[in-house]
Amino acid sequence: MAVYLITGIGGFIGSSLAHELLRRGQQVRGVDNFSTGRRENLAQILNQIDFREADILDLDAMKLACDGADYVLHQAAIPSVPKSVLDPVGSNRANVDGTVNVLVAARDAKVKRVIYAASSSAYGDTPTLPKHERMTPDPISPYAVAKLASERYMISFYRCYGLETVALRYFNIFGPRQDPSSPYSGVLAKFITQMLSGQQPTMFGDGEQSRDFTYIDNAVEANLLACTAPAAQVAGKVFNVATGRRITLNQTFKLLQKLTSYSGSPVYAAERGGDIKHSLADISHAEQHLGYKPEVDFEEGLRRTVDWYRSQSKAAGA
Ligand code: UD2
């Protein structure tokens, strides 16, 4: 049994990792300051994990958290393009300074490996699709710059200190437990909850932007594979975590109309600053070196996610 430290364990991805690791009989430790994470996400597992309420900006707390950990899954972040455009200093603090702290603590505690939640936003709006890891990054928003900087810190700590690190470039992860309530929430969490409650969603731009939306189970699997894959294949490297398919927001809206029985149309508004138009991953590098294969496709993921939000609203109304 290994000890996994999850930063941002109260978040959507962090809590999903915790649930799966417990299901596999592993020992889970977690930190969160609940700036974007939610206590509800941990309600069912709080008595099975070693939880410490702490900020990744607190180096001493990170050193204590890393002590005795085998793996660190670094998910804590302020994950939003528009929020970073409004507050680049806050974005940099959480998304870069916080990462350096986690790396220093992990290095000093001699953990076996650190897996990092990097972002597809690093690619920017370059016209070439699909995006592959050998492409020169061209981040647009402060969030994208911060995620790329942290990714480079991962690689730096491998090169300078021999700390094994793996950066996973997530492509628009979605699924149960994603917070729909903030103006900065991911589009699918927002659209699904709005449509289930009969509210009209807002589409920023013409709706023809496309994304390689990736169901959470695929991201969880990628993290666990990244912990165990041979170091020679993965340490100090970057991998796309996606499905290798893209869909426009307009097409997604139509699928959601069927799944939620929402018959209205979206309202179209101005394009969001810092946004990129199209996103699609080449996942061959992850397939080859991590043994990654997206097991849940977009449509199935969307069905599961709609079912989950529906069950939540029923439970809340009961
Ligand atoms: C970026 C990253 C993603 C992850 C995420 C963290 C890209 C391609 N993806 O996601 O991997 O790191 O940041 O937040 O950079 N939208 C609407 N209406 C809404 C909300 C959003 O139309 O109510 C649009 C938005 O303008 C964008 C698309 O939906 O074009 C997706 O937005 P998002 O915030 O869900 O995710 P995105 O692509 O910024």
Image (cartoon, rainbow, N blue to C red):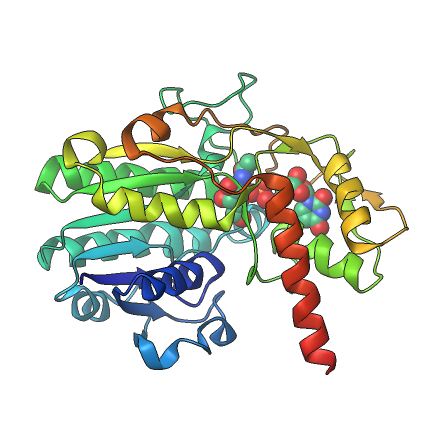
Q: Residue at x 28, y 47 (%)?
A: 115
Quarter of image, res 235: top left
Front residue of 268/142: it is 268
Q: Is residue 156 left or right of residue 218?
A: left
Pick out the residue farthest to the top: 128
Q: Quadrant of ligand 1?
A: top right
What percent of the width, then of the height, locates residue 250?
A: 77, 36
The quarter of the displayed image where residue 239 is located: top left
Pick the residue in front: 182 or 9. 9
Is 56 rendered above or below residue 175? below
Query: Going 78% across and 33% down the picture, which residue do you hit?
Result: 206
Residue 100's spot in the image, x, y percent? 25, 51
In the picture shown, does residue 25 fall above or below 127? below
Q: Position of residue 114 (x, y in %)?
A: 23, 49
Looking at the figure, which quarter contains the N terminus? bottom left
Residue 128: horizontal and vertical position, in percent? Answer: 53, 16
- Quarter-of-image position of residue 195: bottom right
Q: Please indicate, yes or no, whether residue 142 appears anywhere in the rendered image.
A: no
Residue at the image point whose x is 16% and y is 36% from the top: 231
- Residue 311 in the image: above or below residue 243: below
